[in-house]
Amino acid sequence: MENIFEPMIVAFCCQWCSYAAADLAGSMRLEYPPNVRIIRIPCTGRVDALHLLHAFEKGADGVFISGCLIGDCHFLNGNVRATKRVAHAKEILEKIGIDPERLQIYYNSSAMGPQFVQTCIDFTEKIKNLGASTISSMLNVQNEGECHGGKTE
Ligand code: FES
Protein backbone atom coordinates (compact mmCIF):
# COMPACT_ATOMS: atom_id res chain seq x y z
CA MET A 1 0.00 0.00 0.00
CA GLU A 2 1.28 3.46 -0.89
CA ASN A 3 2.34 5.59 2.05
CA ILE A 4 0.91 9.07 1.46
CA PHE A 5 2.77 11.83 3.29
CA GLU A 6 0.51 13.96 5.45
CA PRO A 7 2.44 16.92 6.84
CA MET A 8 1.92 18.42 10.25
CA ILE A 9 1.46 22.14 9.91
CA VAL A 10 1.31 24.68 12.72
CA ALA A 11 -0.45 27.99 12.08
CA PHE A 12 -0.10 30.88 14.51
CA CYS A 13 -3.23 32.95 13.89
CA CYS A 14 -3.99 36.39 15.26
CA GLN A 15 -7.32 36.33 17.10
CA TRP A 16 -8.47 39.62 15.54
CA CYS A 17 -8.16 38.66 11.93
CA SER A 18 -6.98 35.23 10.77
CA TYR A 19 -8.48 33.29 13.64
CA ALA A 20 -11.74 35.12 12.96
CA ALA A 21 -11.29 34.34 9.25
CA ALA A 22 -10.95 30.64 10.15
CA ASP A 23 -14.16 30.99 12.19
CA LEU A 24 -15.88 32.63 9.24
CA ALA A 25 -14.71 29.82 6.98
CA GLY A 26 -16.29 27.38 9.42
CA SER A 27 -19.56 29.33 9.39
CA MET A 28 -19.45 29.24 5.59
CA ARG A 29 -18.87 25.47 5.79
CA LEU A 30 -15.60 25.80 3.94
CA GLU A 31 -13.08 23.08 4.64
CA TYR A 32 -9.34 23.38 5.00
CA PRO A 33 -6.85 20.53 5.29
CA PRO A 34 -6.84 18.80 8.69
CA ASN A 35 -3.04 18.99 8.57
CA VAL A 36 -3.23 22.59 9.80
CA ARG A 37 -3.25 22.97 13.59
CA ILE A 38 -4.20 26.49 14.56
CA ILE A 39 -2.74 28.24 17.59
CA ARG A 40 -4.68 31.35 18.55
CA ILE A 41 -2.52 34.29 19.53
CA PRO A 42 -3.39 37.86 20.58
CA CYS A 43 -1.28 39.39 17.79
CA THR A 44 1.39 38.10 15.42
CA GLY A 45 3.76 40.52 17.12
CA ARG A 46 3.61 38.16 20.10
CA VAL A 47 5.28 35.34 18.15
CA ASP A 48 8.99 35.07 18.70
CA ALA A 49 11.46 33.30 16.41
CA LEU A 50 11.89 30.78 19.25
CA HIS A 51 8.19 29.81 19.03
CA LEU A 52 8.60 29.15 15.32
CA LEU A 53 11.77 27.10 15.76
CA HIS A 54 10.21 25.20 18.65
CA ALA A 55 7.34 24.11 16.39
CA PHE A 56 9.87 22.64 13.95
CA GLU A 57 11.77 21.04 16.83
CA LYS A 58 8.55 19.32 17.94
CA GLY A 59 7.98 17.86 14.47
CA ALA A 60 6.12 20.40 12.37
CA ASP A 61 6.82 20.01 8.66
CA GLY A 62 5.64 23.54 7.98
CA VAL A 63 4.78 26.60 10.04
CA PHE A 64 2.99 29.77 9.11
CA ILE A 65 1.88 32.92 10.81
CA SER A 66 -1.31 34.58 9.67
CA GLY A 67 -1.99 38.10 10.84
CA CYS A 68 -3.92 41.24 10.13
CA LEU A 69 -3.40 43.08 6.89
CA ILE A 70 -0.43 45.46 7.01
CA GLY A 71 -1.70 48.72 8.50
CA ASP A 72 -4.61 46.99 10.31
CA CYS A 73 -2.81 45.41 13.28
CA HIS A 74 -4.68 46.14 16.52
CA PHE A 75 -1.32 46.75 18.16
CA LEU A 76 -0.17 49.05 15.35
CA ASN A 77 2.85 47.19 13.99
CA GLY A 78 2.80 43.67 15.44
CA ASN A 79 2.51 42.15 11.97
CA VAL A 80 5.46 44.21 10.75
CA ARG A 81 7.56 42.93 13.66
CA ALA A 82 6.37 39.39 12.93
CA THR A 83 7.43 39.77 9.29
CA LYS A 84 10.95 40.67 10.44
CA ARG A 85 11.03 37.75 12.88
CA VAL A 86 9.96 35.33 10.17
CA ALA A 87 12.80 36.62 7.96
CA HIS A 88 15.24 36.10 10.85
CA ALA A 89 13.88 32.61 11.61
CA LYS A 90 14.20 31.70 7.91
CA GLU A 91 17.91 32.54 8.08
CA ILE A 92 18.31 30.27 11.09
CA LEU A 93 16.38 27.47 9.39
CA GLU A 94 18.64 27.68 6.36
CA LYS A 95 21.74 27.47 8.58
CA ILE A 96 20.48 24.32 10.27
CA GLY A 97 19.51 22.64 7.00
CA ILE A 98 15.75 23.17 6.97
CA ASP A 99 14.26 24.66 3.82
CA PRO A 100 13.17 28.22 4.73
CA GLU A 101 10.17 27.80 2.42
CA ARG A 102 8.68 25.72 5.23
CA LEU A 103 8.05 28.95 7.11
CA GLN A 104 5.77 31.69 5.80
CA ILE A 105 3.77 34.68 6.92
CA TYR A 106 0.40 35.63 5.44
CA TYR A 107 -2.07 38.42 6.07
CA ASN A 108 -5.82 37.79 6.16
CA SER A 109 -8.52 40.05 7.55
CA SER A 110 -11.46 38.67 9.53
CA ALA A 111 -13.62 38.96 6.38
CA MET A 112 -11.25 36.79 4.35
CA GLY A 113 -12.53 33.33 5.29
CA PRO A 114 -12.23 31.88 1.77
CA GLN A 115 -8.76 33.40 1.34
CA PHE A 116 -7.68 31.89 4.66
CA VAL A 117 -8.87 28.49 3.48
CA GLN A 118 -6.94 28.95 0.24
CA THR A 119 -3.84 29.89 2.25
CA CYS A 120 -4.16 26.61 4.19
CA ILE A 121 -4.70 24.57 1.01
CA ASP A 122 -1.79 26.18 -0.87
CA PHE A 123 0.63 25.94 2.05
CA THR A 124 -0.29 22.31 2.74
CA GLU A 125 0.29 21.49 -0.93
CA LYS A 126 3.65 23.27 -0.85
CA ILE A 127 4.78 21.29 2.21
CA LYS A 128 3.54 18.03 0.69
CA ASN A 129 5.74 18.75 -2.31
CA LEU A 130 8.73 19.48 -0.06
CA GLY A 131 8.19 16.24 1.88
CA ALA A 132 8.80 15.59 5.56
CA SER A 133 11.25 17.88 7.34
CA THR A 134 14.47 16.34 8.59
CA ILE A 135 13.39 16.67 12.21
CA SER A 136 9.89 15.26 11.73
CA SER A 137 11.40 12.30 9.83
CA MET A 138 13.74 11.61 12.74
CA LEU A 139 10.90 11.89 15.26
CA ASN A 140 8.73 9.52 13.23
CA VAL A 141 11.53 6.94 13.06
CA GLN A 142 11.97 7.21 16.83
CA ASN A 143 8.23 6.85 17.43
CA GLU A 144 8.02 3.81 15.17
CA GLY A 145 10.88 2.26 17.15
CA GLU A 146 9.08 2.95 20.41
CA CYS A 147 5.81 1.51 19.09
CA HIS A 148 7.54 -1.74 18.33
CA GLY A 149 9.29 -1.78 21.65
CA GLY A 150 12.74 -1.54 20.17
CA LYS A 151 15.36 1.00 19.33
CA THR A 152 15.85 2.38 15.88
CA GLU A 153 19.22 1.93 14.25
FE1 FES B 1 -3.58 41.00 14.27
FE2 FES B 1 -1.53 42.39 15.36
S1 FES B 1 -3.57 42.31 16.04
S2 FES B 1 -1.53 41.03 13.66
Image: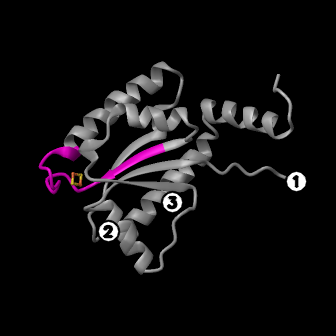
Q: For the residue carrying disc 3, how many other residues have a C-alpha within 10 Å: few (<14), some (14-19), or many (20+)?
A: some
Residue 120 image position (x, y, % from top left): 47, 58
Instruction: Indicate whether residue 33 is drawn in magenta.
Output: no
Q: CA distance from mark 3 to mark 2?
A: 14 Å
Q: Earlier in the sequence, mark 3 or mark 1?
A: 1
Q: Please report contact status of discs 3 and 2: CB closer than 8 Å, yes or no.
A: no
Q: Name the image quarter holding the C terminus.
A: top right
| Residue under pointer 3 | 121
Mark 3 C-beta closer than 8 Å to ligand 1:
no
Q: CA distance from mark 1 to mark 2?
A: 39 Å
Residue 113: image quadrant is bottom left
Q: Please report contact status of discs 1 and 2: CB closer than 8 Å, yes or no.
A: no
| 76 relative to 153, above or below | below
Mark 1 C-beta closer than 8 Å to ligand 1:
no
SS class, disc 2? loop
Q: For the residue carrying disc 2, how many other residues have a C-alpha within 10 Å: few (<14), some (14-19), or many (20+)?
A: some
> Where does the magenta region start and end?
63-79
| Residue under pointer 1 | 1
Residue that protrudes farthest toward the top in the picture: 95
SS class, disc 1? loop
